[in-house]
Image (cartoon, grey):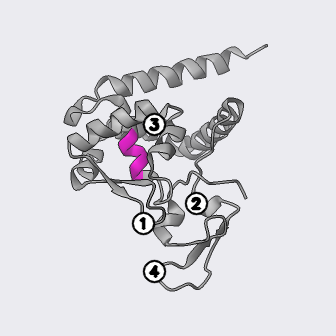
Amino acid sequence: MNIPGAAIEAAHLIDRIERLARSGVQMHGLNPAQWEALRYLARANRFSRTPAGLAAYLGSTRGTVSQTLISLEQKGFVIRQTSERDRRSIALGLTEKGRDALADDPLLGVAQDIAQTAGEDVGAIADMLKRALRVTISRNGGRPFGLCRTCRHFRGNEDRGQANPHFCALLKEPLSEADGADICLEQEDA
């Protein structure tokens, strides 16, 4: 395999930035895995905020995710509830403490650094990283977790009332504007 040196350097830089971002994450008493779980729960739609969804997103085992969730629940950052859609499932949510912690998310510092150094190129950098992520997910057999509104199952403006103007054809569920803007476990490119 002939990989260009610049691509290897870029991979090393991404890895180093990620490690440096994690080095100061002990704010709020959270470890890196707990921060990742909070970030996911803040971005995931109501159908994807499950232990299985979190495990799939992180590429982790359900056992590891279970331990992370137990700790977050004990610390008051996450709440578990029986799913309204399927009484056999668990739905996860952020508490006010969890949402407040995300205002201090160490990843925001990295985002600020990228914005400062990339300038007008920030959109192009984000697009390139999305494409690289898509290829990596495909190679590893993972799920894309794209935005709900970019999914082939998303039906926009189905006139289902102002609170839920959209619809998921896969799950047969009405969707709000907020649902459409969140990431989804079931997302498939249109």
Q: Is residue 177 above or below residue 75?
A: below
Label 3 and label 2: CA atoms lie apart by 26 Å
Write down the region rendered in magenta: 37-42
Sooner in the amino-acid sequence: mark 2 or mark 4? 2
Residue plotted at (28% across, 40% down): 72
Sooner in the amino-acid sequence: mark 1 or mark 3? 1
Residue plotted at (46% across, 20% down): 16
Residue 84 percent location from the top left of the image? 42, 66
Q: Secondary structure at mark 1?
A: loop
Sooner in the amino-acid sequence: mark 2 or mark 1? 1
Magenta-drawn stretch contains 90: no
Q: Are marks 3 and 4 in contact (CB under 8 Å)?
A: no
Number of the label disc, if any, that sits on residue 114: 3
Q: Which residue is mark 2?
A: 148
Number of the label disc, if any, that sits on residue 84: 1
Q: Is residue 32 left or right of residue 131?
A: left
Residue 148 percent location from the top left of the image? 58, 60
Disc 2 packing (10 Å; few <14; some 14–19; many ≥20): many
Label 1 and label 3: CA atoms lie apart by 40 Å
Residue 160 percent location from the top left of the image? 56, 84
